């Protein structure tokens, strides 16, 4: 897929490198042309100098064919404006904005823009929202038999109990990340839109678990 990144700081340049290694095409935008020096010498994507929420700048970066957009500059307001333009003007489906003020995260989430607060930022969290499929491994035990991973899930799971997901998949939901905050799911916990689900499971069962998460709950649930 084609991904547009606004902001060529440490976060943006790291994302660009990871995405290129994953054989995605990348365009990165920054107001300061000198910021592009953070990119590796073999970076083959587009370098676009300009304001990341400017229409012409976004078009130059290929936003019209982009399937994902990440706003990871140093300014909260710029990131949110750019993310909204990408989503609402250009119809980009997978959009994420980095923010410095975690107290504002819930407001932005209600606007339909997934956010990652700086104090909790990891490349995996941003990538999950840009590439919302499959599994992101977070930890494996020394034997390699048990894995803790974040798993994408079909929207049909929203509104269903975590216990049903565990019953059908055979995996254990270790925690949820909701609006940037980790939480341990209690009895009766229900999956909400925007949740990130972290599960523990046997490594050799991961593909079967992924299929259950991707398929949604069975009839009767």
Image (cartoon, rainbow, N blue to C red):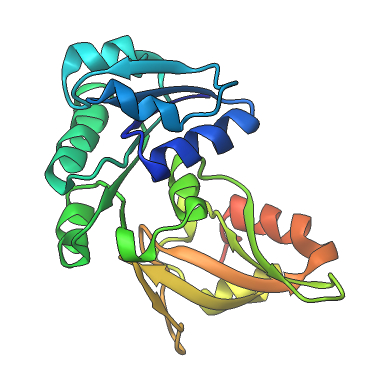
> Is 170 above or below relative to 60?
below
Residue 111, image x, y percentages: 17, 48
Q: Check the image and name the residue furthest to the bottom.
A: 187
Q: Is residue 177 left or right of residue 119?
A: right
At x 76%, y 60%, the residue is 206
Left or right of residue 51, residue 35 in this image: right
Q: Residue at x 20, y 29 (%)?
A: 88
Residue at the image point whose x is 55% and y is 22% from the top? 43
- Name the quadrant containing residue 159: bottom left
Which quadrant of the view contains residue 106? bottom left
Residue 161 visible (yes or no)? no
Say above or below: 198 vs 93. Answer: below
Residue at 64% from the left image edge and 32% from the top image edge: 21
Residue 29 picture location, percent across and down: 31, 24
Front residue (pair 84, 159): 84
Can you say whether 107 is above or below 75 in the image? below
- Taking 123 as reference, is 65 left or right? left
Tell me residue 213's x, y (percent).
61, 57
Query: Where is residue 3 drawn, in percent x and y?
Result: 44, 27
């Amino acid at each position: 897929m084609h991904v547009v990144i606004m902001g060529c700081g440490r976060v943006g340049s790291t994302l660009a490198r990871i995405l290129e290694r994953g054989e995605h095409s990348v365009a990165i935008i920054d107001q300061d042309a000198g910021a592009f020096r953070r990119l590796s010498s073999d970076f083959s994507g587009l370098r676009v100098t300009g304001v990341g929420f400017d229409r012409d700048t976004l078009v130059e970066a290929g936003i019209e064919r982009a399937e994902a957009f990440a706003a990871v500059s140093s300014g909260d307001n710029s990131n949110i404006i750019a993310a909204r333009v990408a989503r609402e003007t250009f119809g980009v489906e997978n959009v994420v904005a980095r923010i410095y003020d975690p107290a504002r995260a819930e407001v932005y989430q209600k606007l339909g823009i997934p956010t990652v607060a700086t104090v909790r930022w990891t490349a995996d969290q941003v990538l999950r929202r840009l590439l919302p499929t499959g599994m992101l491994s977070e930890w494996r035990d020394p034997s390699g038999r048990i894995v803790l991973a974040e798993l994408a899930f079909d929207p049909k799971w929203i509104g269903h109990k975590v216990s049903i997901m565990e019953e059908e998949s055979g995996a254990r939901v270790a925690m949820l990340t909701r609006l940037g905050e980790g939480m341990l799911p209690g009895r009766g916990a229900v999956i909400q839109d925007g949740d990130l689900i972290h599960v523990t499971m046997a490594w050799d069962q991961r593909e079967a678990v992924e299929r259950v998460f991707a398929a949604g709950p069975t009839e009767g649930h």
